[in-house]
Amino acid sequence: MERIQKILAAGGIASRRAAEKLITDGRVRVNGRVVTELGAKADARDDRIEVDGKRVVAEHRVYVVLHKPRGVVATMSDPEGRPTVREILTPVGARVYPVGRLDFATSGVLLATNDGDFAEGLLHPKRAVPKTYVVKVNGKMAAADMDLWRNGVRLEDGMTAPAEAKTLRFEGDKTWFELTIKEGRNQQIRRMGEATGFPVMRLARLAFATITADALRPGQWRHMTRDELAQLKKTYGVPKSIPSPPEKIESTRRARVTRTGGGRTDRAGRPVADERERSKSAERSAPSADRSMRVRRESPHQPRQPRQRGSEVDAVAAPRAARGPNTHRTSGRGSSAATAPERAVRPSERTRTPPTEATPKRSPYDARSRDPRTKRG
């Protein structure tokens, strides 16, 4: 059993806060009964949950890594009209939201998901999930200054937790260093720079936990791999279950073809012919003359049909007497027997003698000679 606003958020209807307003407005029904209490719970599998008469179906869990560019707000909407990550994450195909935030001028790794438990598990302070940044500050930091960042900096909201820091390089009076923190205060690194006298000029997140965006350019995103999710589950206990790869999820949404009986049908039950059936159908629909020519060409050992005098066969083919005993009629279109090339003679045909056409003799003992009514000359 889960809270209804959580189920609505998992179904991509709205955020939890917006889902609470849907409940208080009386737009949510559970098993046909209107629910207006925010503490009400339901079973997403057994109960029928509807919003404005439409049933809520939970979306498949999606986990995305985004390389957030500078000049983009890490929220789904902005009252000032600035660009948001929602415009970048629209092609994901699910209602995902960022896990934590990055400043408007900060770039780097940003996770996004539609799994509320996953986001809450990584952002909870007791998890102490590490986040690694590369920082450029104005001023040349000495070893003592770096130790100050490692041990903690006093801010207006208290001391920061110990951090890991190492110097990367110097560019004149500018310092580049790598910083790993396990907190998530608002504008924490920039406020630490102001408190220590080293204003932050550039800031980029390199990793969130063990997730990086090395192969991504600013503004690009990718799905998290099963190995990455498995490592997060082993270390931080989330996600609770590892979903299938995105390509397998997409394949289940396509029309599947199943074999039933002796034929094939698609998901709608319409018959689908395979390659062999299509070729047979094309052969059956071919004209009879073309089909007979194809049979004759493909079967040269078929017995010859008797030649009919005065027919089209005599007009096209040369007389048998003009051809030799080892020659055969050609099948080339538009060519005569005199100019057509001779076909090669098979060994089995060399010993065969052509049939002779002898004129039958009239027997004196036929029926006509025995008929007494026949006049004899």
Image (cartoon, rainbow, N blue to C red):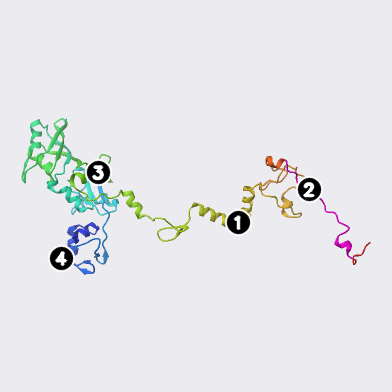
Q: Is residue 8 left or right of residue 273?
A: left
- SS class of the residue under badge 4? loop
The amino acid at mark 1 is Pro
Frontmost of labels 2 and 1 is 2
The amino acid at mark 4 is Glu
Q: Are marks 4 and 1 in contact (CB under 8 Å)?
A: no
Q: Are marks 3 and 4 in contact (CB under 8 Å)?
A: no
Who's the residue at 64% across and 50% down the image? 296
Q: Mark 2 or mark 3, which has the lower sequence index?
A: 3
Q: Is residue 16 left or right of residue 323?
A: left
Point out residue 328 in the picture as x, y percentages from the top left corner.
71, 45
Q: How many other residues sit within 10 Å of disc 1, few (<14), some (14-19) or many (≥20)?
A: few
Please give the residue where the numbered disc 4 appears in the rendered image: 37
Frontmost of labels 3 and 4 is 3
Which contiguous range is marked in magenta? 351-371
* Residue 68 visible, this angle: no
Measure the alpha-carbon separation of dots 2 and 1: 35 Å
Q: Is residue 333 magenta?
A: no
Please give the residue where the numbered disc 2 appears in the rendered image: 356
Frontmost of labels 1 and 3 is 3
Q: Mark 2 or mark 1, which has the lower sequence index?
A: 1
- The quarter in which the C terminus is drawn is bottom right
- SS class of the residue under badge 2? loop
Please give the residue where the numbered disc 3 appears in the rendered image: 228
Point out residue 110 in the picture as x, y percentages from the top left corner.
21, 45
Count the labels in the image: 4
Q: How many other residues sit within 10 Å of disc 4, few (<14), some (14-19) or many (≥20)?
A: few
**Residue 287 badge:** 1
